[in-house]
Image (spheres, coloured by chain):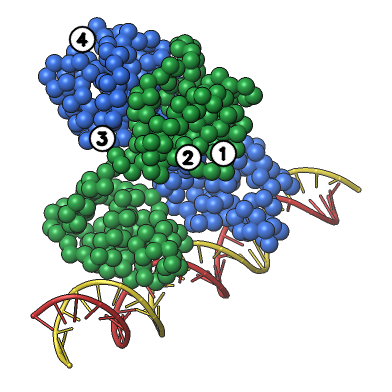
Chain colours: A green, B blue, C red, D yellow
Amino acid sequence: MSEEKNIRVLLVDDEPAIRRALKTPLQELGFQAVEASRGEEALHLVRTDSFDVVLLDINMPGIGGMQTLVRLRALAPRLPILMLTVRDEEHDKVEALEKGADDYITKPFSIRECIARIRAAVRRSKTPERSEDAPIAVGDIEILPARRIVKKAGEAVRLTPKEYEILLYLMRNAGRAVTYGKLLTSVWGVEYRQEVDYLRTFVRQLRKKIEKDPSHPRYLLTDPCVGYRFAEEVAFARGTNGAAAGDAWLPT
Amino acid sequence: MSEEKNIRVLLVDDEPAIRRALKTPLQELGFQAVEASRGEEALHLVRTDSFDVVLLDINMPGIGGMQTLVRLRALAPRLPILMLTVRDEEHDKVEALEKGADDYITKPFSIRECIARIRAAVRRSKTPERSEDAPIAVGDIEILPARRIVKKAGEAVRLTPKEYEILLYLMRNAGRAVTYGKLLTSVWGVEYRQEVDYLRTFVRQLRKKIEKDPSHPRYLLTDPCVGYRFAEEVAFARGTNGAAAGDAWLPT
DNA sequence: AGAAGTCATGAGGAATTTATGAAGACGGCC
DNA sequence: GGCCGTCTTCATAAATTCCTCATGACTTCT
């Protein structure tokens, strides 16, 4: 709600009056508003600066709003772009939306609605896939971030802070290779990006605690020369005994 | 454009007429449309099934549209939800958007606009964070850069870092001949521009891993005296057995 | 047909990475 | 101070990746 101080809005319209009409209330709410009067200028700004959302007038001299939209979209696939226009024609709306606009606001617009739409677009683009505290589970490993609890087959597992951090990060990125650098940066801080040895030691401990056979991990896998990866799914639903399973996996 | 076959839309409205008015054109376009007449039903469906977008009427008996919106949003933080309503009141719009709606469509609405907004919402939710992370697929070879995973006919293939780098570069330039020099520079660095032998060895390994018949590659082709090229498309749609295909090709 | 160049193949070993185990450093707590 | 669990450090073993090189097949040109 209140943390809109750092949200950067790019206003693109050739009419200074309209830019001002938006800029003032936005700034009053704590947004940072930057103005551009032409499409080319907007493109340049987006290339060199960083914004959270763009308000783009359709009707402009030079390269029009539609052209600008297309090029912006190519530049920044997920940047929210709201089109602004006097025309309320279905054809335009459909075209803009198909070209990648996130929303379409017709002038004369209500400032409040406009701001609500800006907020919605920004919130949407920043919403993580899962919420912070949402439990994550893979196979019989489960992590409850809200309570900082890790369970293996229903049984709580005691993890030290670092172990927990590592596991959490890996499980939040389950299925994808996580670079040594990313893990180290996330858990220890950037200045430790190189200390791969730390990771090895902790991964070892983690495997001891969560793997049935630490030498043939099924969850906490290593991607040689890249980093570690938490399994996306565990292929076999073996009930109790896993000793055989480990061997069966080995290509050797 | 055409791959809307697998997009699942949930239509929530207490009036059957409206549901039908949307369902028919959506189905004609290849969307899968599922109906719900009440908020509770919608919540249950979202919990148990999987949808790409929800169209939600505000005015409904039982728990109203707004309530449903809030609960849906709690359930699925990133599921696109488009509100549908007869009222065109600023207050409602602002409230819905603040409660997490993705868009707001006023009845009577144009079907075309409505569909454009649905498409926009779905596209948005599926756009990868960075365009470099966008998946690439040719034939039954697929590469998911975000996860650093390569799949052949749906099965994950284990690639070493260099193998992966080479394949990624080639697939990003699928259809184009890639010079030895470019590949070597990109994977090993400029100082290795001449080491064509490295490439040969690795291409061999790659072919072993991704080609059905490594001696007669269909994907990773060689452009004599130039370099390698990843096929743009694979000509024949093979069913299951590929052995025959390989032989049939042989001029020998 | 022969020569020259290019590409494919295969396997062995060097080099780099990762796993493992254990000992020492550190910090909080009784 | 002594105890405890956690974090660092380091040496060694194991595993994997990468590189080298020799040989043979294929194509093109003379």
Mark 3 → mark 4, Cα distance in angstroms: 25 Å
Residue at mark 1: A45
Residue type at mark 3?
Answer: Ala
Whether residue A176 is visible, yes or no, is yes
Q: Is mark 4 on a helix, strand or loop?
A: loop
What residue sits 47% from the left and 11% below the top? A89
Residue at mark 3: B76
Residue at mark 4: B15
Mark 2 → mark 1, Cα distance in angstroms: 9 Å
What residue sits 47% from the left and 46% below the top? B145
| Comparing labels 3 and 1, the label whose residue is closer to the camera | 1
| Position of B237 relative to A244 (above/below) | above
> Who is closer to the viewer here, A60 or B74?
A60
Q: Residue A34: image x %, image y %?
A: 50, 37
- For the residues labelled 2 and 3, say whether their Cβ atoms are less than 8 Å apart: no
Q: Do labels 2 and 1 share a chain?
A: yes
Residue type at mark 2?
Answer: Phe
Specify whether A156 is left or right of B77: left
The subunit letter for the residue under badge 3 reads B
What residue sits 31% from the left and 10% below the top? B107
Q: What element carries label 3?
A: loop
Q: Which mark is residue A51?
A: 2
- For the residues labelled 2 and 1, say whether their Cβ atoms are less than 8 Å apart: yes
Mark 2 → mark 4, Cα distance in angstroms: 42 Å
> Who is closer to the viewer here, A60 or A91?
A60
Residue type at mark 4?
Answer: Glu
- For the residues labelled 3 and 4, say whether their Cβ atoms are less than 8 Å apart: no
Q: Are marks 2 and 4 on the same chain?
A: no
Specify whether B200 is left or right of A104: right
Q: What element carries label 1?
A: helix
